[in-house]
Image (cartoon, coloured by chain):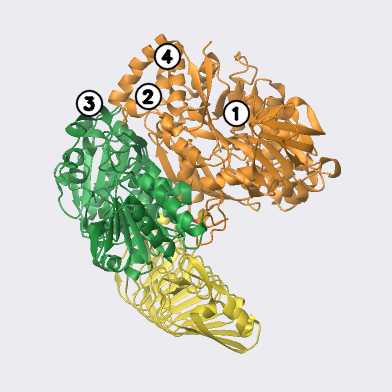
Chain colours: A green, B orange, C yellow
């Protein structure tokens, strides 16, 4: 029996690094301190069916083949493609992401991450206005006001509030929750809202209106605010603005309620401007509540390797970036690619119907530990090790802090990184006869 | 056993007092040696200028630059070069390149190598973010790297200074260098990063840091003493308080004076003051703003305990990035520019804001002149490191352009003619006729770095040095660098050969191969008892205030695939 | 006068990127040279005449140049990108970036134009006899300026972010516009004859006139009397005050 301390939970963007894992006979038998979601990842992995063998679809059925045959088939798809979509890469290590980007470059493909369906608009907002942010520990130690806007950590990031935000105790916040005012802005009273000091319910899709009104209030233009904005009374808006101005340190945590509702990235853009305005009066920062445990890492690696955080198109050689044109769902709904490779993400479960219909028409390569709806659409399937449990590597927390995930148990499966490297070599061989 | 012989090189190697002398250079197994066998591969330099590979001792190349990239798709549209892609790849050697001020990691390696630079130093590593810095280091091809670790607004540092615990302070700094795999102590706007945690700043050397009861002056002095106690290869590396503010030259000189009497543990400076252009402003507001370079240069000429670098401005788009959080916020409000910020728990702050330096803008024109004035008014080139604080003053790809300003009064006059009249009255450059020669340029771009970073194998071409060599397509005996500045710029923009560790990495301006570079870091040994005592305090920091466990905080060996560990013994 | 007629031979599998299909590049070239010009088809380059039937009539400089494009080019991007003079007529829906960065000349699209039509254009004219997509006359990601000069007319509707970051020039939309038209306008002139939502946010300079209904008027403008334009009286607003803007927004 082995007890591994300081293990990192590779489930959500909180990337808790205080987990104790007990391993007996190469099986995780106990997990301490993880939330229910994290626990399910560690312990639950032994309950799910793994993809046991490489597979190729023959006569409509996925059949087991040798690894070499699958590599050969996948490389042929990539080399013969005029434009491949490479998608996912957020529940894997930065090392694998780096190789996936190289494969995309080698094959003149387009590569995008799961940010396409969650926090991609946050990146666009940063590109408009910048991202005034901080590490989570700054919030823990300083924030006396925190806003959860369009996010529900009580469900999506269960330990966030205890470790980093509402309930955490820090240097200037020794009393924890008592030292903080917790505000939730959302369209429905979530479980997070239920434990807040203040809940501001807004009309669906009206985030941008509320941001604008708050900015007007903070910048001293109360007179232009009508009686009600976004379903919120002027009086409440002015009160909220005043709370923010008088705070010592405000953090706005924002989620998909902000990034995926009407006005999308312009909401984040507006919040960024709000933060800048607020810093004229006090201190304020914003942090996106990222979902997949390494979607932040994808953005980091992609940025230093290609210059852009997602939706990078190598079709013409040099990286090109234009979400709305080069995002995974942009090209799928328009039928702008003729093959796809999907890894460490489940497009089958999360993409809109139009995208899935098109995926069903083109050759799809999947790399994943588990069979999932994407498998049903795939023509070549590679089983992979579970990164963060069966393979080590780097991941980035939602605030951009990187941590090294440990290998907790042994596996017979290859890692995403190893599979992609084999694909690169095979593609090179086919391209250059090397 | 690889051997290489460079024949007919006109060598400019100030460390060895060689001033453009024709000679041969022998290389074996990546090092410069006395001689090689007759079987050695031969490169005929044909009388071309040959220098040690350049060393950029202060650049932003890994870590914070990614924040700059992330927010700058407009910059990425510039200077694109395709890489491995397509059915017939344009190259099998190089990856795709994008960006100008914030190029991708591959482009950083290729472009520095083409300029004849072979070693670069990242100017700021937050300890908790160091893993990221090293990931990017690993992605930068060809070059050797090192980075300076931020200590100037660190809680543990400030508490030990306040509580007068010099032994624990030394133990903490040694631990911090190890945790971050850093090469030296960087201090940015001492205390200002902590004040920025509340949206505030410190106003000068004697303004106490909120809640910590120490002053910036105390932070500088104590860290400088620690630096010598640890016997570190580099001195403290100081970004002064009040950066970017008119009248700040006084703070800069006062900061320099703090360490006049510091006894150094090694034969090097007691302090390095960085990007002084941004800290040599006179006047009281942007209206009466003028150059404070003469005052700073006068002081530097009278002192013998310090070196500095320029932070030269290049006209055109640039990207400011610094651990000086309050400065970046102020920039963004003044320029109406996008603003990224990253406060770092218990340690520091940072910000990134784009800027464009226009020769038509009076302030920018004076800034441009100040950098050059500092270089030309300080008599001893061994005190001056050439930098643009890339990309703060401008991208490093513009270094050759800046060399021409330093080497040719004629070139300067041409630029000055295009500047606004108002700017001319606020600068001293038009009256300066000094023109640097190739020897002095070699000092400022590689030789002085060898000394200030105590890197015996870098920045020169003596026996035992790393075979990092730049051969420029320029013949020193047949060029007047004060007149033929276009030829100078062309030659320095793209080497005939860049040799890194004995391998030809650039030939005729094209990347020939892309070996992986090494990473230098300092393992400063202190008495175990001091470390143990320090760890008791540090454990509390991790238990109560950090959001990362100590076990996951230290950069693991996996992130330095090619480490060069420099071990020092505390005095 | 030189007229070149391109007809797409068959429907393309992935988008064609045809930034080389513009008047400057075609002018004074014979048929075989025009046919040999390369366009991107996926991750490879192919000749124009592999994809299009090419008919060349006459011979002339760019000022006397007209390109007529037939067939379904709804998945051909970047036609007319960067052109400086002459004329392009597209008798189909057209894909993204048509006329982006153009500096002169005229493009007529007899169909719908997909997103980024006239993006960052500096001069010339684009007429869309149909609907426009997102970012008509806008700027690319992270840029400070979209359209700087010239004129875009869309007879139908457009989607969101019309004229984003515009720094000059003129856009007229006869139909409705989606969300946030004229956002971050810094000197452009926009007329929307139909309805729209949240116009003129963060406007610094320029003029935006909405003839139809405005939904979700943003609380960041100061009312400043009325103004008559072409005999119609509008309520006049100044802002965006949060951006310190001095733009003019006229609504009914």
Q: Nearer the viewer, residue B411 or B266?
A: B266
In the rendered structure, which disc, 4 or 2, sits on the residue that comes first in sequence?
4
Q: Which residue is mark 4?
A: B168
Report, in whole angstroms, how far the alpha carbon at label 3 lies from the one at label 2.
41 Å
Above/below status of A124 relative to C172:
above
In the rendered structure, which disc, 1 or 2, sits on the residue that comes first in sequence?
2
Q: Which residue is mark 3?
A: A3
| Front: mark 1 or 4 | 4
| Front: mark 3 or 4 | 3
Task: Evaluate whether label 1 is on the same chain as label 4.
Answer: yes
The disc numbered 1 marks a residue on which chain? B
Q: Which residue is at a point 40% across and 19% down the rendered structure image?
A: B159
Q: Nearer the viewer, residue B516 or B419?
A: B516
Q: Which mark is residue B211?
A: 2
Report, in whole angstroms, how far the alpha carbon at label 1 lies from the one at label 4.
25 Å
Q: Check if mark 4's residue and mark 2's residue have beta carbons within 8 Å.
A: no
In the rendered structure, which disc, 1 or 4, sits on the residue that comes first in sequence?
4
Q: Which mark is residue B192?
A: none
Q: Position of residue A130 (x, y in %)?
A: 42, 49
* Any part of residue B208 in sight: no
In the structure shown, which secondary structural element does the residue marked by tag 2 occupy? loop
Report, in whole angstroms, how far the alpha carbon at label 1 lies from the one at label 2.
27 Å
Q: Position of residue A274 (x, y in %)?
A: 35, 49
Q: Check if mark 3's residue and mark 2's residue have beta carbons within 8 Å.
A: no
Q: Which residue is mark 1?
A: B273
Task: Evaluate whether label 3 is on the same chain as label 2.
Answer: no
């Amino acid at each position: 029996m082995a007890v591994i301390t300081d293990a990192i939970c590779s489930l959500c963007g909180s990337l808790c690094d205080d987990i104790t894992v007990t391993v007996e006979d190469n099986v995780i038998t106990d997990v301490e301190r993880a939330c229910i979601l994290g626990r399910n990842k560690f312990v639950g992995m032994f309950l799910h069916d793994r993809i046991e063998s490489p597979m190729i679809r023959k006569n409509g059925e996925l059949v087991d083949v040798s690894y070499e045959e699958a590599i050969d088939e996948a490389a042929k798809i990539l080399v013969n493609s005029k434009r491949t979509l490479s998608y996912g890469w957020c529940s894997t290590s930065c090392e694998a992401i780096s190789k996936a980007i190289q494969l995309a470059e080698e094959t003149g493909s387009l590569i995008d991450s799961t940010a396409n369906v969650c926090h991609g608009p946050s990146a666009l907002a940063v590109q408009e206005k910048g991202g005034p942010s901080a590490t989570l520990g700054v919030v823990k130690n300083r924030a006396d006001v925190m806003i959860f806007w369009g996010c529900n950590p009580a469900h999506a990031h269960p330990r966030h509030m205890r470790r980093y935000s509402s309930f955490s105790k820090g240097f200037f916040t020794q009393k924890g929750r008592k030292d903080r005012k917790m505000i939730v802005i959302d369209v429905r009273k979530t479980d997070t809202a239920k434990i807040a000091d203040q809940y501001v319910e807004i009309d669906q899709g009206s985030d941008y209106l509320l941001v604008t009104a708050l900015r007007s209030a903070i910048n001293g233009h109360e007179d232009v605010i009508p009686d009600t904005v976004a379903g919120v009374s002027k009086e409440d808006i002015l009160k909220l603005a005043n709370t923010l101005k008088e705070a010592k340190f405000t953090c706005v945590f924002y989620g998909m309620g902000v990034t995926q509702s009407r006005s999308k990235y312009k909401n984040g853009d507006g919040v960024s401007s709000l933060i800048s305005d607020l810093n004229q009066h006090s201190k304020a920062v914003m942090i996106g509540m990222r979902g997949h445990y390494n979607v932040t890492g994808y953005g980091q690696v992609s940025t230093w390797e290609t210059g852009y955080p997602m939706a990078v198109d190598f079709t013409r050689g040099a990286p090109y970036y234009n979400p709305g044109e080069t995002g995974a769902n942009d090209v799928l709904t328009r039928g702008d690619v003729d093959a796809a490779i999907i890894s460490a993400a489940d497009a089958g479960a999360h993409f809109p119907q139009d995208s899935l219909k098109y995926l069903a028409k083109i050759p799809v390569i999947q790399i994943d530990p588990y069979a999932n709806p994407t498998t049903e659409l795939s023509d070549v399937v590679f089983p992979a090790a579970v990164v963060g449990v069966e393979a080590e590597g780097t991941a980035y927390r939602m605030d951009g802090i990187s941590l090294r995930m440990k290998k907790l148990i042994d596996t017979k499966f290859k890692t995403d990184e190893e599979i992609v490297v084999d694909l690169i070599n095979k593609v090179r061989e086919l391209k250059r006869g090397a | 056993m690889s051997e290489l012989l460079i024949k007919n090189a006109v060598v400019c190697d100030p460390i060895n007092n060689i001033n453009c002398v024709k000679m041969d250079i022998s290389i074996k197994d990546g090092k410069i040696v006395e001689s090689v066998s007759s079987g050695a591969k031969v490169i005929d330099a044909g009388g071309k200028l040959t220098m040690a590979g350049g060393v950029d001792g202060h650049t932003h190349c890994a870590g914070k630059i990614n924040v700059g990239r992330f927010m700058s798709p407009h910059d990425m549209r510039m200077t694109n070069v395709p890489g491995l892609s397509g059915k017939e790849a344009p190259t099998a050697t190089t990856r795709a390149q994008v960006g100008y001020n914030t190029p991708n990691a591959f482009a950083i390696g290729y472009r520095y190598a083409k300029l004849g630079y072979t070693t670069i130093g990242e100017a700021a590593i937050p300890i908790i973010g160091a893993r990221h810095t090293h990931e990017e280091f690993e992605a930068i091809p060809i070059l050797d790297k090192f980075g300076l670790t931020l200590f100037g607004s660190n809680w543990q540092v400030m508490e030990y200074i306040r509580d007068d615990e010099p032994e624990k302070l030394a133990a903490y700094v040694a631990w911090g260098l190890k945790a971050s795999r850093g090469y030296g102590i960087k201090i940015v706007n001492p205390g200002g990063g902590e004040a920025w945690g509340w949206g505030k700043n410190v106003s000068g050397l004697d303004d106490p840091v909120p809640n910590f009861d120490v002053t910036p002056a105390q932070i500088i002095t104590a860290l400088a003493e620690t630096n010598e106690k640890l016997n570190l290869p580099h001195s403290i590396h100081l970004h002064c308080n009040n950066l970017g503010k008119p009248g700040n030259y006084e703070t800069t000189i006062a900061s320099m004076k703090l360490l006049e009497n510091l006894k150094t543990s090694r034969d090097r400076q007691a302090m390095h003051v960085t990007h002084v252009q941004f800290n040599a402003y006179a006047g009281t507001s942007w209206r009466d703003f003028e150059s404070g370079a003469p005052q700073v240069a006068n002081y530097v000429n009278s002192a013998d305990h310090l070196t500095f670098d320029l932070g030269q401005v290049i006209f055109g788009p640039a990207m400011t990035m610094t651990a000086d959080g309050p400065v970046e916020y102020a920039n963004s409000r003044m320029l109406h520019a996008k603003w990224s910020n990253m406060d770092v728990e218990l340690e520091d702050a940072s910000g990134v804001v784009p800027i464009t330096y226009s020769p038509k803008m009076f302030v920018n024109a004076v800034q441009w002149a100040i950098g050059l004035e500092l270089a030309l008014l300080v008599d001893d080139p061994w005190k001056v490191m050439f930098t643009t604080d890339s990309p703060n003053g401008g991208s490093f790809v513009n270094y050759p352009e800046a060399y021409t300003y330093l080497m040719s009064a004629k070139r300067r006059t041409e630029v000055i003619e295009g500047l606004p009249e108002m700017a001319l009255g606020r600068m001293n450059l038009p009256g300066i006729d000094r023109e640097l020669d190739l020897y002095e340029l070699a000092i400022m771009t590689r030789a002085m770095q060898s000394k200030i970073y105590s890197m015996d194998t870098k920045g020169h071409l003596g026996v035992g040095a790393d075979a990092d060599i730049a051969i420029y397509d320029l013949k020193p005996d047949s060029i007047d660098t004060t007149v033929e500045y276009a030829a100078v710029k062309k030659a320095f923009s793209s080497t005939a050969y860049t040799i890194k560790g004995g391998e030809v990495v650039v030939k005729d301006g094209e990347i020939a191969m892309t070996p992986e570079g090494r990473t230098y870091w300092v393992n400063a040994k202190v008495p175990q008892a001091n470390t143990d005592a320090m760890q008791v305090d540090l454990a509390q920091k991790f238990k109560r205030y950090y959001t990362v466990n100590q076990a996951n905080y230290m950069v693991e060996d996996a992130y330095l695939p090619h480490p060069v560990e420099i071990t020092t013994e505390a005095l | 006068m030189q007229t070149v007629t391109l007809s797409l031979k068959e429907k393309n599998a992935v988008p064609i990127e045809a930034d080389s299909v513009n008047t400057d590049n075609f002018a004074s070239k014979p048929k075989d040279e025009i046919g040999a010009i390369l366009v991107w088809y996926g991750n490879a380059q192919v000749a124009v005449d592999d994809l299009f039937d090419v008919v060349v009539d006459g011979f002339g400089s760019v000022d006397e140049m007209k390109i007529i494009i037939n067939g379904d080019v709804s998945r051909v991007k970047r036609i007319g990108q960067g052109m400086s003079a002459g004329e392009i007529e597209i008798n189909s829906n057209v894909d993204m970036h048509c006329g982006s960065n153009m500096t002169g000349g005229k493009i007529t699209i007899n169909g719908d134009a997909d997103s980024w039509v006239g993006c960052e254009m500096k001069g010339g004219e684009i007429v869309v006899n149909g609907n426009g997509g997102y970012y008509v006359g806008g700027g690319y990601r992270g840029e400070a300026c979209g359209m700087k000069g010239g004129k875009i007319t869309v007879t139908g509707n457009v989607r969101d972010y019309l004229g984003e970051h515009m720094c000059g020039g003129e856009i007229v939309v006869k139909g409705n516009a989606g969300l946030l038209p004229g956002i971050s306008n810094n000197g452009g002139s926009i007329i929307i004859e139909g309805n729209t939502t949240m116009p003129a946010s963060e406007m610094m300079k320029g003029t935006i006139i909405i003839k139809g209904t405005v939904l979700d008027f943003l609380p960041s403008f100061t009312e400043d009397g009325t103004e008559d334009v072409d005999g119609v009286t509008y309520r006049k607003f100044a802002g965006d005050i949060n951006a310190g803007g001095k733009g003019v927004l006229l609504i009914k």
